[in-house]
Image (cartoon, grey):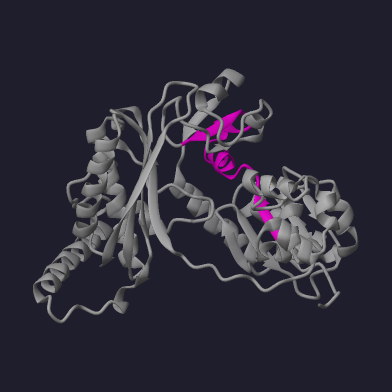
Amino acid sequence: MDDSRPLRWLYLDLNSYFASVEQQLDPRLRGRPVVVAPVDTDSTSAIAASYEAKAYGIRTGTKIWEAKAKCRDLIVVPGQHEHYVRFHHRIIEEVGRHVPVYAVCSIDEVACRLLDNENSEAAVRRIAAAIKAGIRANVGECLTSSIGVAPNRLLAKMAADMQKPDGLTIVPAEAIDGRLKALKLNDIPGVGRNMEARLAAAGVVTMERLLQLDARQARQAWGSVWGERMFWLLQGQELPELETVNRSIGHSHVLGPDKRPLAAARLVTRRLLAKAATRLRRAEKRCSRLGLSVKLEAARGEKPLKWSAEVRLPPVMDTPALLHALEGLWNRMTGELAARRLLQVGVVLADLTAADAVQPGLFDAGAVRDERRALALSQAMDKVNARFGRDAVTMGHDRMGAVKSSGPRIAFTRIPELAEFRE
């Protein structure tokens, strides 16, 4: 393998992104401890915290009631996800003025591949300074970022985490070993509790010990080929990117207090499924599996119980068929649980295939006609809602617009299309 390991990747990680956008939008929030919450209730958790809030030990995932106990002056704001997506696109445009964006890794992270005339330390510092200044001037002064630069994308991402907020960390090849030894195993992206336990069972409990393994030992410790891949990446080598495939479409929603009774939660769930079905058709896909998941409301301090199940389907893409399948799952859930109130609901469409990959059966003409009518109805509803706004027409589900829904939520690895905020 080529031993040449020049600085090849620049990785930008926006600092406390959601909270920073809120502070940019509302000057009264600047310099104040702010958390962003999915709904206005103390039983939910923070989805973002400003650095002023982090100073009190408040983090993403901290319960709102706990966060308020840590900081009396805490300001809780509801998430405005459409704004986060709009700012995201402006930031991507600004970064692209200084260096081409190779990959959008999440709503608040981008990776850029450097050319040979861009990868000296002096050039890297100039580019990083220009990006930061451009974002401040052209997007918003509250939107700071940490930038990491290293021989490969994984190390550049890890470098971006080394100095926050507003940092720049350059890790040339000769410094990799020393910089990594100062880290913990869970500083490696993708290494969570389960992987730490697996590595510990193999006698690997420190980064230094991990770096002592050879490729074969790393593969054994990891329990898969990923270990061998990680060995080379931590050495600073570049490997071909693994292609990712979108295998599911889903939505989940933390329920406000008025939406937690089963009847109200059911209508919210039907709406989530209708949104997912619209995305399915826009992607020109069919699904063969529908999943339902719920969290039960719990007393303060208790962990909510979870329930999930799925059902197999013939490849479908129309809303009526999916809603019919959801009713079966919902009835199963209510029959198995004694719950009267739910905290969160979610649906997922999985086993996706191309819409035109399914051939109609020769001896089921009636079913084919019914499916075509259902699909035509679904597509007509899509067009009406796209033109006249969210929930202009519905199919027996909750009108989320009436309760001031902020639209789709952002999973950090999936950025909603702006069209979804009008669905």
- Which residue is found at the position 78% from the left and 66% from the top? 215
Point out the stretch of residues depicted in magenta: 10-37
Q: Is residue 49 above or below residue 152?
A: above
Vertically, is 357 above or below 92? below
Residue farthest to the bottom, as pictured: 362
Q: Is residue 24 magenta?
A: yes
| 24 to the left or right of 268 | right
Q: Is residue 55 above or below residue 177?
A: above
| Residue sitting nearer the eye, 9 or 315 | 315
Image location (x, y in percent) of residue 365: 10, 76
Spot occupied by residue 229 in the image (x, y as percentages of width and height):
71, 66
Q: Nearer the viewer, residue 140 or 260?
A: 260
Residue 191 appears in view: yes
Q: Which residue does the image show at 37% across and 44% down from the upper left?
A: 308
- The number of numbered discs placed on residues in the rendered structure image is 0
Q: Could you tell whether 27 is left or right of 233 in the image?
A: left
Percent coordinates x, y for residue 57 in the rendering: 66, 28
Identify the residue at horizontal 31%, vertical 48% (top origin).
272
Magenta-colored stretch includes residue 335: no
Q: Could you say where residue 195 lies in the image, as x and y percent from the top left? A: 66, 49
24 with respect to 399 (left or right): right
Q: Between 278 and 83, which is closer to the camera in this rendering?
A: 278
